[in-house]
Image (cartoon, rainbow, N blue to C red):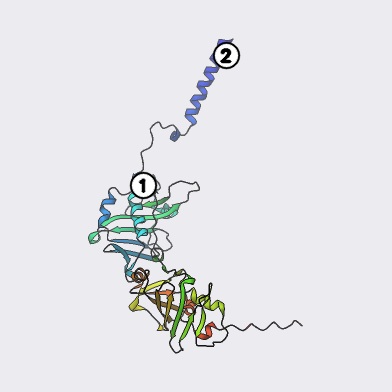
Amino acid sequence: MQRRTLLLLSTAAAVTLGAALVLTPSVLRQEVAPPAARLAFDGLAARLASAERIEVRKHDASLVVARQGDAWVLPERGNYPVRAERVRELLVGLTELRLTEPRTTDPGQLDRLGLDDPMRPGSTALLLRVLGTGGQPLAELVVGRRRVRTQGNVPESVYVRRPEESQAWLAEGRLPVDSDPQLWMDRDIANIAEARIRRVTVHRVGEPELVLGRGEEPEAKLRIQVPPNPPSFDAVSLDEVARAFEYLTFLEVRPEREVPGTALGEARFELSDGMAVTVWPSRDGDTLWIKLRAEGGADAAPLNARWQGWAYQVGVWKEKAFTPRLEDLQEREAPPPPAPAR
């Protein structure tokens, strides 16, 4: 009985094992590991030394970043410099990008991956080109949708294809590419703390001189010094003048010679460390543009290196911070109480 039972159990185990082998997907039964993902561009790192131009194009936008000496600039923004780390991140990303999984080759299915014709209206695809000397292509890709990963410590991935091919790939690696020039520029102008502003002298066209200053007592605030015996002032408006350069960023930039609008005058901001910043605002309809120059102090040289030759569009509300009128700083009358309901 024991021998017969053992034979029956052995037979049943063999049948079960056979069934498992038949029903298990073949991908799970591979004894040889699949080939490793290959680089999208072999030997690209060495060739990028000659890179001179980066193009990002889509049906409704285009971006060109050009090499100018050791810097990268935006020709359509008067050769304004772009963030060096953004260019480096993109180029390094291209050298490390690996094709991990082949996807569809059907041109009719490419739009599902964001890889259809980038020039087709409504397409979300981007055409990325890195060009070398004489316009020679060093790397070209159509870049599609990024694949969202919900797990931590998982590499980023994106769908790509070569422009002349319909073969789509899932690629592993970070590829920060965008056609919006705002994302390539460092939009910070300055960040000067409110407490460093000690004196402000405003010469606005058609207005008398206005001087604001602080007393020597701790925590002193800006007060109106000229004209003498001013009317009651609004503390909030004066604080806005003191904070004129805190986290100051631009909306748009142009070469200084192309600044639009009508000049409003100038204001000189004197700081506690001996540096002074002069600002020249111009109003163009609903936009405000400024030019800047620093002098004195250790920070003046690096600030001028960034500002020289440029005009920046800033929020139009900054007009009252840079070139206020006396009336802009006066205390507001409290609105009359609402009429009693009848």
The kind of secondary structure element at disc 2 is helix
Residue drawn where x is 47% and y is 85% of the image: 210
Residue 27 image-quadrant placement: top left
Q: Is residue 312 at least partly visible in the picture?
A: yes
**Quarter containing the N terminus:** top right
Marks 2 and 1, the one that precedes in the sequence:
2
Residue furthest out toward the left: 134
The kind of secondary structure element at disc 1 is strand
Residue 80 image-quadrant placement: bottom left
Whether residue 69 sits left or right of residue 35 in the image: it is left
User: With respect to residue 3, does 273 lie above or below?
Assistant: below
Residue under label 1? 98
User: With respect to residue 232, does 88 lie above or below?
Assistant: above
Q: Position of residue 225 (x, y in %)?
A: 50, 84
Q: Position of residue 185 (x, y in %)?
A: 38, 65
Q: Position of residue 24 (x, y in %)?
A: 48, 32
Mark 2 vs mark 1, foreground winner is 1
| Type of amino acid under label 1 | Arg
**In front here: 313 or 26?**
313
Contact (Cβ within 8 Å) of mark 2 with mark 1 = no
Residue under label 2? 5
